[in-house]
């Protein structure tokens, strides 16, 4: 059986390897697209070059955020650095919006100035777009698997970048075919606008997904159900409440108040806590779980007294209002 520390190390090595592969691939594609865009004068190919440029920058950000997010907690960051991946994804979404704006500006300029020479080098453009589409699909699928396995927002953002790039490459490929078949140059800025629209949609989704962990959004219901399942199947647990869960980058965090018999010794309560936390971590690998133990009957009595006091204050307030009237 592979020790947990070794499994964690292997995961991080794989994440970094995939991030480096994404960066190198994006670098090659963006250079090729820029050269071809300059030679051909195509707005659509230029838009793809910008899109790939955003992917390149995003891949670099993803790589460094993955490295930084896995550094151990320190005195200033006792909960670790996991949220840097969400910040990375948020920054990548902004890059997509900027790229889309540049593409739209280029397309509008081409519409306003139809005398600009028509696209040349169509065969080279179609070949490059086909290669770009295939490479990005393969790499996006690989990154998506890594992101799901390691619950990495940065890797997921990178995968979405590449998936969007594959889609837009296919669109540019189709547009270049139409230009070749019809000779109508307006296909070029039209495809550029379509590419920009797709980039905006991708950026909006990425922005939404990146903001959720930063807002401490709760874990999925299925994850919370696993925690509750562990508590429900232990006879020593008489009740529980105040379950709170959240994301912190690729890490899950949760805390809950668990109620047990009043006369249980401190040692037995500690043992129960350790056992429950181990079971929850086994069900949800990588989760940071904290359990607060409470005496069941004393807590029930406290809640009844608090409720009675609240009702008394409410009744007293109501009587005061009636006297004023």
Image: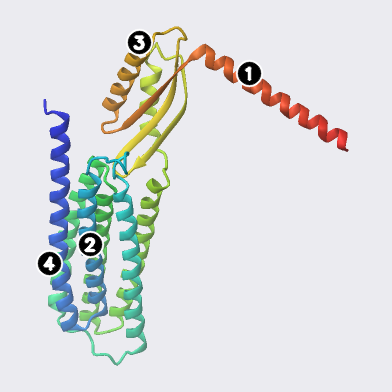
C-beta proximity under 8 Å, tags 4 and 1: no
Query: Secondary structure beneath disc 1?
Result: helix
Disc 2 or 3, which lies upstream in sequence? 2
User: From mark 2 to mark 3, how far is it between C-alphas?
Assistant: 57 Å
Crowdedness of circle 4 by 10 Å Cα count: few (<14), some, many (20+)?
few
User: From mark 1 to mark 2, how far is it between C-alphas?
Assistant: 62 Å
Disc 4 or 2, which lies upstream in sequence? 4
Q: Position of residue 48 (x, y in %)?
A: 24, 71
Depth check, mark 1 against mark 2: the one in front is 1
Determine the image quadrant of residue 182: bottom left
- Decide which of 124, 286 is in the foreground and name it: 286
Q: Which mark is residue 166?
A: 2
Q: Considering only vertical position in the picture, is 32 above or below 136?
A: below
Q: Seen in the image, is 192 located left or right of residue 311?
A: left
Residue at mark 4: 28
User: From mark 4 to mark 3, how far is it between C-alphas?
Assistant: 61 Å
The quarter of the image holding the N terminus is top left
Residue at mark 3: 268
Q: Considering only vertical position in the picture, is 129 above or below 146?
A: below
Depth check, mark 4 against mark 1: the one in front is 1
């Amino acid at each position: 059986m592979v020790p947990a520390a070794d499994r964690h190390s292997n995961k991080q090595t794989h994440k970094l390897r995939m991030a480096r592969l994404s960066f190198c691939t994006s670098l090659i594609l963006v250079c090729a697209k820029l050269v071809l865009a300059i030679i051909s004068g195509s707005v659509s190919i230029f838009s793809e070059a910008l899109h790939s440029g955003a992917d390149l920058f995003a891949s670099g950000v993803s790589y460094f955020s993955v490295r930084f997010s896995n550094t151990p907690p320190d005195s200033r960051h006792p909960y670790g650095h996991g949220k840097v991946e969400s910040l990375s994804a948020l920054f990548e979404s902004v890059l997509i919006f900027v790229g889309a704006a540049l593409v739209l500006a280029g397309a509008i300029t081409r519409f306003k100035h139809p005398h600009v020479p028509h696209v040349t080098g169509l065969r080279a453009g179609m070949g490059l777009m086909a290669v770009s589409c295939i490479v990005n699909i393969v790499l996006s699928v690989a990154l998506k698997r890594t992101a799901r396995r390691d619950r990495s927002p940065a890797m997921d953002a990178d995968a979405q970048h590449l998936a969007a790039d594959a889609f837009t490459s296919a669109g540019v490929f189709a547009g270049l075919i139409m230009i070749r078949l019809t000779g109508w140059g307006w296909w070029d800025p039209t495809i550029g606008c379509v590419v920009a629209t797709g980039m905006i949609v991708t950026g909006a989704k990425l922005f939404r997904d990146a903001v959720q962990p930063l807002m401490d959004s709760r874990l999925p219901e299925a994850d919370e159900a696993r925690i509750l399942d562990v508590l429900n199947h232990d006879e020593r647990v008489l009740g529980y409440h105040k379950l709170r869960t959240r994301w912190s980058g690729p890490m899950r965090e949760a805390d809950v108040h668990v109620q047990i018999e009043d006369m249980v010794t401190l040692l037995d309560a500690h043992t129960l806590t350790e056992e429950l936390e181990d079971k929850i971590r086994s069900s949800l690998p990588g989760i940071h779980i904290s359990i607060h133990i409470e005496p069941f009957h004393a807590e029930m009595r406290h809640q009844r007294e608090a409720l009675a006091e609240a009702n008394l204050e409410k009744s007293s307030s109501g009587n005061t209002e009636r006297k004023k009237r």
